Each structure stands twice: as structure tokens, then as C-alpha cells.
Amino acid sequence: MEFILVTPQARPGVALIQLNRPKELNALNLQLMGEIRDALKELDEDEAVRVVVVTGNERAFAAGADIKQMAGKTAIDMLITDQFSTWDAIRKFKKPLIAAVSGFALGGGCELTMTCDMIVASETAQFGQPEIRIGTMPGAGGTQRLTRAVGKARAMEMVLTGEFISAHEALAAGLVNRVVPVGQYLEEAYRLAAKIAAMSPVVARLAKESVNRAFETHLDEGLHFERKNFYLTFASEDQKEGMAAFVEKRKPAFKGR
Ligand code: CAA
């Protein structure tokens, strides 16, 4: 891997993917996105990994898709390159993904945080979809996910003016889970990840799928999907263990089976 660093056990059960193109503010070129896809494939297959944290550095999570790589392309080049296939792979990742964000999360960088399941931000984090300033618009889900996260009025303003919002504005708008001082954002993401890593991974997978369905379908279909996954948890040893532990007043030991 040239543009990312992967630590499969950064904490027990928690892997870290760190974007590592610091001079370019972690601009997301095709190779970097391919590396994330390949790393996630391995982490999905690694049973010891239960949650993945994705981060950048203090100055930038990622300042967007690589403008220099895209600048001269035609629409047909873009179509053939099919750059969003890597994004589809991230979207389909089965385990919980937490973005630990400091500094710029712009354009594709903001979209990558929103493709994750939760966002922990440092006080210096800035979120934005500034594509309109360079004559284009979000292409990796920004118009859809931002609108679902923060509502139409604010999403429309961000997408049409390209202006950024601060970490605290993002928290108030419901885009991020929590904001912490800059020295603590990664630790805080690990803390959140550790809580989830202590749960049954099979149930976490079914629950993640079900929450995501809320954004992908209508209520009736979503409720149906949720119910099936709820019933499916009763086929797991972890459900038996979790409920037995409650009755016996002890901590459950989940096995992922
Ligand atoms: N692509 C390629 N290179 C980038 C980049 C990007 N998205 N963002 C920053 N860089 C590079 C800069 O070109 C610069 O490189 P050089 O030193 O070689 O010139 C280096 O990173 C540092 O950047 P700046 O000197 O610009 O740093 P700054 O602190 O003055 O400004 C910034 C920071 C406001 C983030 C500014 O860099 C910026 O506006 N970046 C572009 C943001 C943007 O438009 N993102 C959307 C991209 S399109 C997209 O993402 C489409 C999609 O939906 C998938």
C-alpha cells in the first residue's frame, strides 16, 4: 500500500486505516481509493477485526477527490474509469466503520466520512462540498447523504455555495456523532469502536444493515427487513449467550457465532 497505512489490531478488535498522502492533504486519487477497497476486503475476512476506524491526519482527513488527476478527463474517460466502483465496495463493507476526522473533510473527503457509519470529529474539523467552486458537483454521494444527514436547506446551501461548516455546526446539524479536542479525536474514535467491538459481531452486522436500510427504502420494506434480521439474531449463539448472561447477572462473552 502506497497511500494508506493499515493496522489490523490498532486496539483489540479494532483496525485502523490511515490515509497517507499528507502533502496533497490526502486527496483521494484512484490508487488510494483502490487501496482502501483492497484493505477493507482483507479486514472484512479477518474475524479478529470487528470495527474499522478510518482517519487522516490533524490537518486533513481528505481534501476531496484528486483534482489534478481529474482535471483533463472527458465524461467518457470518467465513465470508463468507473471510479465509484471502489466507493460501492466501501458502502457494502459489512463491519462498522468509524471516521475519525480532523481538519479538512471536503468534497470526496466529506463523502468518505458520510460513507462511514459514524463520525468522530476534532474541534478543528471542517466539512464541505466545495465542488461547485471548481465547476462540478458532488459525485460520491454528497447530494444524497448530506441531505439525509443535515436536511435539505443546509445541504442545499453547502452544495450550492461550497462553504464549509465547522465541527460544532456539523454536530448541531446531526452530521457527526461527537466533537472532541484535537488531541483526542483518534482516541475517542477508538473508545467508540471498543464499545461496539465488545458486542456480537454478527448482530452488529445485521443491525448495521438494518439501519442503512432506513436510507435505502420505504418504511414498510425497511420494517420488514429489520424484522427478518431481528429473527435471524435468534439463530445465533450470541443471542442465547447475551440473554442468558442478562438473566444470570454476568457479562456476556460473544463469539461471533
Ligand atoms: N486534489 C489534488 N490536490 C489537492 C487537493 C485536491 N482535492 N486539495 C489540496 N491539494 C493539494 C494542493 O494542490 C497543494 O499541492 P501543491 O503544494 O503541490 O500545490 C497541497 O494539496 C496543499 O493544498 P493548499 O496549498 O491548497 O492548502 P491550503 O491550506 O491553502 O488550502 C484547501 C486547503 C482549502 C483544502 C484547498 O487545498 C482546497 O480548496 N482544496 C480543494 C478542495 C476541493 O475542491 N475538493 C473537492 C474536490 S472534487 C471532488 O471531491 C469530487 C467528488 O465528489 C468525488
Image: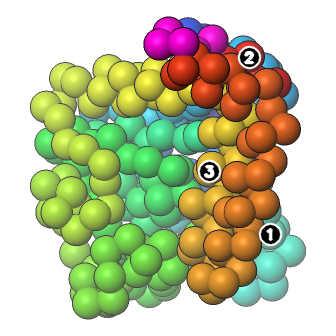
Q: Which amino acid, by three-letter code, is at mark 1? A: Asp
Kindly report the distance in space between the C-alpha atoms of the residues bearing marks 1 and 3.
Answer: 26 Å
Dots 2 and 3: beta carbons under 8 Å?
A: no
Kindly report the distance in space between the C-alpha atoms of the residues bearing marks 2 and 3.
Answer: 18 Å
Determine the main secondary structure of the stretch shown in magenta.
loop
Q: How many marks?
A: 3
Q: Measured from the top left, where is residue 88 in percent x and y? A: 74, 61
First-in-chain label (2 vs 3) = 3
Q: As displayed, is residue 94 above or below residue 148? A: above
User: Is label 2 or label 1 in front?
Assistant: 2
The disc at residue 82 is 1
Is 177 contained in the magenta span?
Answer: no
Q: As displayed, is residue 40 above or below residue 71? A: above
Q: Residue at x 53, y 50 (%)?
A: 116
First-in-chain label (1 vs 3) = 1
Q: Quadrant of the N terminus?
A: top right
Res 87 visible: no
Report which residue position mark 2 lands on: 255
Q: Residue at x 71, y 80 (%)?
A: 221
From which residue to which does the magenta span run?
A: 248-253
Q: Measured from the top left, where is residue 20 in percent x and y? A: 51, 31
How busy is the neighbourhood of tag 2: few (under 14 within 10 Å), some, or many (20 plus)? some
Dots 1 and 3: beta carbons under 8 Å?
A: no
Observer-nearest residue: 234 or 154? Answer: 234
Would you identify the image quadrant in which residue 24 lies?
top left
Report which residue position mark 3 lands on: 208
First-in-chain label (2 vs 1) = 1
Q: Which amino acid, by three-letter code, is at mark 2? A: Lys
Q: Quadrant of the C terminus?
A: top right
How busy is the neighbourhood of tag 3: few (under 14 within 10 Å), some, or many (20 plus)? some
Observer-nearest residue: 122 or 235? Answer: 235
